[in-house]
Amino acid sequence: MWHQVDTLFQKKKPFSLSLSILFLFLSLSSLSIISDFSLLLQYNRPIHMAHSDHSLTNLLCLIILIITNLSLNYILNTLLFKIRPFIHPPTSSTKREESAMKFAESVKILDQSLVSPPPLSSGEVRSSLPLTFFDMFWLNYSPVERLFFYQFPYSADHFLDFHLPIFKSALSVALSVFYPLAATIRRRQPDGHFEIATTDSDSVTLTVSEYEGAAFDFLEISGDHSRPVEKLLPLVPRLPMSPEEQPLLSVQVTLFPNYGLCLAIAVHHAACDGFSSMQFVKLWSAAVAAGLRPDGSSPQPPAPVIDRTVIPDPRNLYLQMEKGVLDERAKEKKVTSGIAGSVFATTFTLSAPEIGRLKKQMQVKAAEQGMRSFHCSSFVISLAYSWICLLKTRRITDGDGAAHVVFAVDWRRRIRPEIPANYFGNCISGCFAKWDAEELLAKDGILVACAAIGKAIDDLGDDAHESMDGLVDRIGKVVPWRPLTVSGSPKMGVYETDFGWGKPRKVEVISTRETGAVALAESRDGEGGIEIGVILPEEDLKAFAKHFAAGRDW
């Protein structure tokens, strides 16, 4: 038992020693009480019963010692899981870097393999897909990296022997449906335009790793509290980016034996948007869950529509996008956050009651000020709230004193005729809002922010081509002012991915470290709240947290 305690707190030897001494003290106290009780019995028993009483007492002492130790060990494992983040004192940046380096060195690869879709039957074919103008916009962007943390109270050997075969088989099945994800993006001949090119050897790299440090660290790294991003990076699979040929999907599972696992997925954004990638993950998770259940049952999501002809291009926007993207590539320009040094990931949550209260406040204040009605959803409230907090934290404006926000809008149901909801690919464009920073920072700044974002959504209309026309240039113009950008959506249902291990403990997007975006997702409790993932330097994060807490009194 002492070894278990020291393993849990191998970086806190004095603390674990104190706990060990406490265990010993309590155990000896129990023994002393029982011994006193046995003496009392012996004084009041006939002599011929003394020896049997003594044996019975020894047995009782042994049982009490075992129960005491096991009980205290259970209490330690249960209660201290929740308080470990508060036990560790603040450390210097140098110590944090050393800690992150040690964490990375503790992640060891156990298995790495290529998983392919099943072979096609005679006469079947997986067609290559041309990139649409929606897809082409994302060609230069870094992969989207999403981490799913699950409770997994089994050993690494158990996963390798029992779960991994099902995991691989289910991945192969999912890739047979979402076959473009196993392919690569490259230029086709003879016109040189970009396509998702399929071959008989298409595959996805699946890496299985084990964290060899204290498995207890799983609970620290998968929480909502501030964590150095350097510690999360070893959990993320690599997706090579090459101008000639770009793979579209890579997967890594990192095991924290007997505690949990992290499933990390890197997806090239030019292949599909977040709604489509989550379709894939949900199909895969359903297949794994079915393989783990005795009856083989699991709800199946609808099959995707893999047909690029449903995206019309009457303005030939593809050529415009291709030229703009290649020009940016030639200049080696990349959308970045402008953040240097160590950064930390933290998740903030707006509960459903808080969102509802803010909605009512916006409606009342807008009516009092004679403002025209505007789109005011939970998404708008959460984005406006984040915008104000970030502006108060960093106060970055353009030359005219305006602050900017850019977010994605899904066109599947906006465009006419409608595109199928389960269309696989990109079907999003940028939506821009800006407002005078001084007004945003004033007393009713949250109302101003909601109105600016809501009006931008209302003004979109149903013409996706107009929204995409000149998008590369418009993004380029606002990038110097470091606008707030958004990754994800509460409508994606990221917490609905059950691989047979239950709901994720935590879902996190960390590719936002490249762009400075906030990541939005539905709250894990499923009660209508919204999670807001933020990656910032430590001092900025402290300021953001202060403004976020104060905003509850707006």
Image (spheres, rainbow, N blue to C red):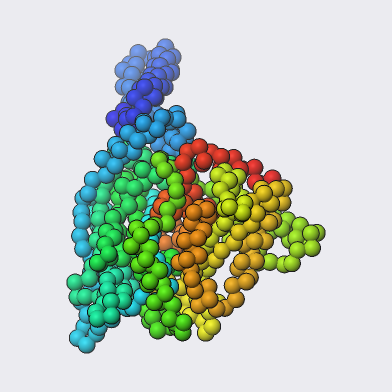
The percent coordinates of residue 138 (x first, y second) are 40, 66
Identify the residue shown where x is 45% and y is 66%.
Answer: 472
Relative vertical location of residue 511 with respect to residue 341 in this rendering, above or below: below
Quadrant location of residue 352?
bottom right
The residue lying at 56 percent from left, 39 percent from top is: 543
Q: Residue 426's spot in the image, x, y percent?
A: 42, 71
From the image, which quarter does the N terminus lie in?
top left
The image quarter in which residue 239 lies? bottom left
* Residue reaching furthest to the bottom: 123
Which of the 4 quarters of the picture holds residue 169? bottom left
Residue in the foreground of this view, choosing between 155 and 312: 312
Residue 169 relative to residue 317: left or right: left
> Total of numbered circles in the picture?
0
Any part of residue 216 in sight: yes
Location of residue 23 in the rendering, given as x and y in whole percent from the top left corner: 39, 24
Q: Considering only vertical position in the picture, is 88 above or below 176?
A: above
